[in-house]
Image (cartoon, helix red, strand yellow):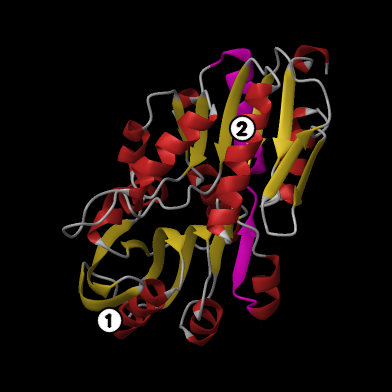
């Protein structure tokens, strides 16, 4: 405990369970702060302890309601900056607006860059995030950015709980090929890719499958499961090609709209998600969803940042 006297961990309202787990792993109490709303919805934050000269970490995924949690994070950072915290690290397990990382049509925003500017302007000195939708988002920041991966948590579970014989790892689209290849390499599995054509936001149509899945166990690997349209259409296409069984990984279980219903009706055996986003209520509606905690990885990264050790060596 003595080595962490200058370390403070604060939690927003988005995922207090994960924040509490991280604080317990490190061995420090969660920082005391009051977060409330005025009658018109304005957010008010008051830091209830001394943070002058402290190394402060604020844990807040920008999940649903995205804008509420984002503004809450910005206000917490501003409050800590004005309270003279020495360094403020925004820990964002799920980085909202990450899918708007480039102009896909004329006259559209690059919202990921806008969010980066807002976080920096609020007073964040460092960013810590997990499984970004696009790695180039790190380049939107002019402050240090540590990008973590949930891969070790999922791989450990797969090796202990799943039969990985005759396994083929499937990327749900061309953009996720690198992610799927990383899993295939570590699991000594084959690789397949779904050729997907997206007609509009949250809607996609599977065209065809590149690779052989016949008589194999298929593992779909994705970073975000939102409405689960891409995932369940891909699962159906894989089963149509003769796969024996199919399960999936999605680091961030957004699970909005008809996601749970689609998963229940799909040929998926299991969907593994992490607790970067709280999905407690969704599990009650779908027994195919299993949640793994990324608390140990985030805890170790925070400890290493605080003590000045290498974070990248976590994944080497």
Q: Is residue 155 above or below residue 169?
A: above
Residue furthest front in the image: 40
Residue 26's x, y, as percent?
A: 75, 29
**Quadrant where the C terminus lies?**
top left
Q: CA distance from mark 1 to mark 2?
A: 50 Å
Residue 191 appearing in the image = yes
The residue sitting at 62% across, 39% down in the picture is 75
Residue 130's x, y, as percent?
A: 49, 42
Q: Which residues are magenta?
A: 286-309
In magenta stretch: residue 15: no
The residue sitting at 42% across, 37% down in the picture is 116
CA neighbours of label 2 inside 10 A, class few (<14), some (14 to 19), many (20+):
many
Q: Is residue 8 above or below residue 84?
A: below
> Please, what secondary structure does the residue beneath circle 1 have?
loop
The residue sitting at 79% across, 15% down in the picture is 5
Q: Nearer the viewer, residue 56 or 207?
A: 56
Q: Nearer the viewer, residue 248 or 139?
A: 139
Residue 206's x, y, as percent?
A: 25, 77
The residue sitting at 58% across, 28% down in the picture is 89
> Please, what secondary structure does the residue beneath circle 2 have?
helix
Q: Pointers 1 and 2 in contact (CB under 8 A)?
A: no
Residue 61 appearing in the image = no
Image quadrant in which you'd find residue 46? top right
Residue 241 image label = 1
Residue 77 image label = 2
Residue 32's x, y, as percent?
A: 82, 34
Q: Nearer the viewer, residue 166 or 30?
A: 30
């Amino acid at each position: 405990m003595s080595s962490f006297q200058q370390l403070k961990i604060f939690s927003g309202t988005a995922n207090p369970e994960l924040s509490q787990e991280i604080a317990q792993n490190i061995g420090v109490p969660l920082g005391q702060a009051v977060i409330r709303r005025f009658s018109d919805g304005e957010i008010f934050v008051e830091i209830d302890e001394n943070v002058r000269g402290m190394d402060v970490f604020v844990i807040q995924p920008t999940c649903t309601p995205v804008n509420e949690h984002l503004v809450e994070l910005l206000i917490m950072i501003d409050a800590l900056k004005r309270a003279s915290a020495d360094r403020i690290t925004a820990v964002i397990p799920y980085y909202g607006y990450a899918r708007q990382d480039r102009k896909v049509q004329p006259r559209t925003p690059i919202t990921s860059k806008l969010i980066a500017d807002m976080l920096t302007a609020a007073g964040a000195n460092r960013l810590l995030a997990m499984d970004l939708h696009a790695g180039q988002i790190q380049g939107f920041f002019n402050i240090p950015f540590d990008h973590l991966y949930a891969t070790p948590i999922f791989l450990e579970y797969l090796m202990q709980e799943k039969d990985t014989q005759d396994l083929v790892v499937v990327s749900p689209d061309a953009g996720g090929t690198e992610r799927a290849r990383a899993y295939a390499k570590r699991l000594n599995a084959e690789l397949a890719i779904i050729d997907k054509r997206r007609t509009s936001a949250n809607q996609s149509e599977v065209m065809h499958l590149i690779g052989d899945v016949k008589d194999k166990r298929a593992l779909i690997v994705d970073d975000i499961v939102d409405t689960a349209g891409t995932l369940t259409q891909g699962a159906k296409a894989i089963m149509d090609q003769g796969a024996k069984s199919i399960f999936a990984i999605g680091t961030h279980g957004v699970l909005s709209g008809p996601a749970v219903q689609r998963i229940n009706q799909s040929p998926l055996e299991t969907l593994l998600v992490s607790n970067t986003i709280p999905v407690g209520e969704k599990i009650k509606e779908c027994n195919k969803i299993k949640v793994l905690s990324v608390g140990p990885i985030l805890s170790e990264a925070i400890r290493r940042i605080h003590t000045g050790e290498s974070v990248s060596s976590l994944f080497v």
